[in-house]
Image: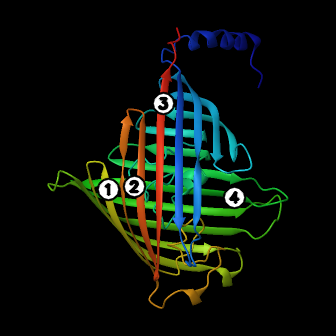
Amino acid sequence: MKLPASVLIAIALSLPAQAQTITEPATVNLQSVFYGDNTEFVGNPYRDGETLMGVHNKLSLVLPLGARSHLKLGVFTDQRAGGEKAFELIRPIVSLTIGDEKNQFIMGTLETPVATEQGPDRIGPHGLLPPIQVETYAFTRAFEAGMQWKHQGRVTSDLYIDWQKLNTPQHREKLNTGLVTKAAVYGPLSLGGQFQYVHQGGQLFDVGPVSDSVAGAAGAILDRESTVLRGRLTGEFYYASSRNVPARGDAATELTGHGFFMRAAYEVQGIRAYGIAWRSHDFVKQEVDPNYGQALPDGIYDSSVHTKRGHRYYETGVSRRFYPDRMVWIEPALRLHWTNGHLDYSYRIIAALNFDYVLSHRK
């Protein structure tokens, strides 16, 4: 149905008047993360040693559209030290956010801040447990685009879908979707739940098998202030399960597994010391930290390299976070990794800044 010309004219004339009612200022935001990560894994059949050093930046202009929405426009860059290219990745930042501080629905570039909590084991893009997603994606895949819903309150939730590849004649489409939630129960006790699904497929071009890989975890979280040195004590216990289907329709390739994840940490005066214990059977999933998953670095499951008692992994580490300036923090960390009898170490230093410049108010 066509609108009368007078109605269209009235709508057009009303737009400038509506724009003039926006009193919130525009803001220029810069988020930079400098990282140096070294994993000295020698003889470990699960995870290869790797050194990552670089910086990624998110420079954006945040334009308020009203009291409950804003538009973000900018650019993302990822630069690796020693790389042959000036930038490993350059992507535009375009996102529309609708909602308030409690509930936000985001379309376009996702909101995935790095290291909102201290510790090298907790810096993943969405705070997923390492058995579900390896934490170094905070460096190697810091840009995500799709849709996201974030909720803050007694229950906190981050529900997202990240579209990584389109279906082309060269490769299948690839996406991952996940949920991280935490619900306060009573005092220091909370319940936690996590889920992630990784899919490769597409109907336009048949390029390789369709694959599905999913894992979920549910558990309890204890977070309380300690009288010892006025520190903070946290403890987590999760039961996790996985289902990996590298070739849909081929039942022989399917594998279902489960595991138990335990983590305890103590924080005092900027220092965090922690320990992790993981026991699992046939736990295989895409995007998992290879030290947790029972698959070799090439993604192939080989039962001959695993013990009859199942897969065992232990980790301990210490980190210290410094705040030399209000907008900057820096955090060095040292870790020890024990995977089915293989002892390795790693160390990391990251620094981050979050800078906002408020432009003049619009009238």
Q: Nearer the viewer, mark 4 or mark 1?
A: 1
Q: Are marks 2 and 4 in contact (CB under 8 Å)?
A: no
Q: Secondary structure at mark 2?
A: loop
Residue occupying image coordinates x 52% and y 17%: 359
Position of residue 284 measured from the top left corner of the image (x, y, whole percent) = 56, 75
> Please, what is the three-letter code of the amino acid marked with disc 2?
Gly
- Cα–Cα gap, marks 1 and 2: 7 Å
C-alpha gap between disc 2 and disc 4: 29 Å
Q: Position of residue 131 (x, y in %)?
A: 48, 68
Q: Residue at x 72, y 68 (%)?
A: 210
Q: Crowdedness of circle 4 by 10 Å Cα count: few (<14), some, many (20+)?
A: some
The Cα–Cα distance between marks 1 and 3, rounded to whole angstroms, is 26 Å
Alpha carbons under labels 2 and 3: distance apart: 22 Å
Sequence-first disc among 2 and 4: 2
Residue 241's label in the rendered image is none
Kindly state the secondary structure of the residue where label 3 is placed: strand
Decide: few, some or many residues near mark 1? Use Cα within 10 Å; few <14, some 14-19, many ≥20: many
Q: Secondary structure at mark 4?
A: strand
Tag shown at residue 272:
1
Residue 187: image location, x then y, percent: 21, 53
* Circle number at residue 119: 2
Identity of the amino acid at label 1? Arg
